[in-house]
Amino acid sequence: EPEVTQTPSHQVTQMGQEVILRCVPISNHLYFYWYRQILGQKVEFLVSFYNNEISEKSEIFDDQFSVERPDGSNFTLKIRSTKLEDSAMYFCASSEAQGSGAEAFFGQGTRLTVV
Amino acid sequence: LAKTTQPISMDSYEGQEVNITCSHNNIATNDYITWYQQFPSQGPRFIIQGYKTKVTNEVASLFIPADRKSSTLSLPRVSLSDTAVYYCLVNDYKLSFGAGTTVTVRA
């Protein structure tokens, strides 16, 4: 069964450092997403990406964040100048279509710990 | 976007059937109802989707009444491994997850 893969599974970084979280979506999918989940809280939408551009972003996704699809297979989330409150699980997802009826597939997540 | 309301938590015992009802009063004509499951420290996983009446797969059943203002996810004969958070989503192209329903299955 095809799956979304994320690397690394766990990343520890110092406050103020930049991190790049990597995702390989399912190959024939066209829509890509990043979410985060702070421990004990709900899954929060960050950004959606289609046709090499951001299609939607939340208020969480400020100038500190950026996404990129550098080579047609990877989908990355960059967090510049990390803060303690960026510590969370980050999930990547992809889907073949978007909107009602579309099924999204999620990766296993990257646990980011900012110290 | 249709707003959904579901119970915060439910407790059950192994072998019982668990029914989680989600209210979505302002569902639009072409909206589908989708349920996801999330185990601790894992990403959400699609479990079932429907438009009207009843849908069944190997994991669950989804019951949708004629007015489509609510839906009920039914998990037959739950086991300890069904302990998870269950989310109801309606036509949300960016998949906004609410708090979901935390289902705890006890031995």
Image (cartoon, coloured by chain):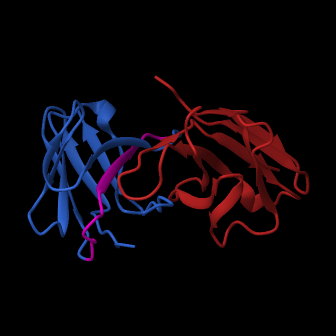
Point 41% across, 62% down: residue: B99
Answer whether residue B32 is magenta in the image: yes
In the rendered image, the quadrant that contains the C terminus of chain B is top left
Chain coloured blue: which letter?
B
Most frequent secondary structure within the magenta stretch: loop
Residue sitting farthest toward the top:
A1
Residue A11 horizontal/vertical position (percent): 77, 39
The answer to whether residue A95 is left or right of residue B25 is right
Question: As displayed, is residue A80 above or below residue A63?
Answer: above
Percent x, y of residue B69 = 18, 70
* In the depicted structure, whether residue A13 falls above or below residue B93: above
Residue shown at 37%/62% (left/top)? B91
Q: What residue sits 27% from the left and 71% below the top?
A: B27
Q: Residue B39 location, x and y as percent?
A: 43, 40
Query: In the displayed structure, does residue A74 sit left or right of residue B5?
Result: right
Residue B92 drawn in magenta: no
Q: Where is residue B70 drawn, in percent x and y?
A: 18, 65
Over which residues does the magenta segment extend? B26-40
Residue B1 vs residue A55: left or right?
left
- Say if A51 sits above or below A46 in the image: above
> Which corner quadrant holds the N terminus of chain B?
bottom left
Which chain is drawn using red? A
| Residue at x 84%, y 47% (from the top left corner) | A19
Q: Is residue A55 above or below residue B3?
A: above
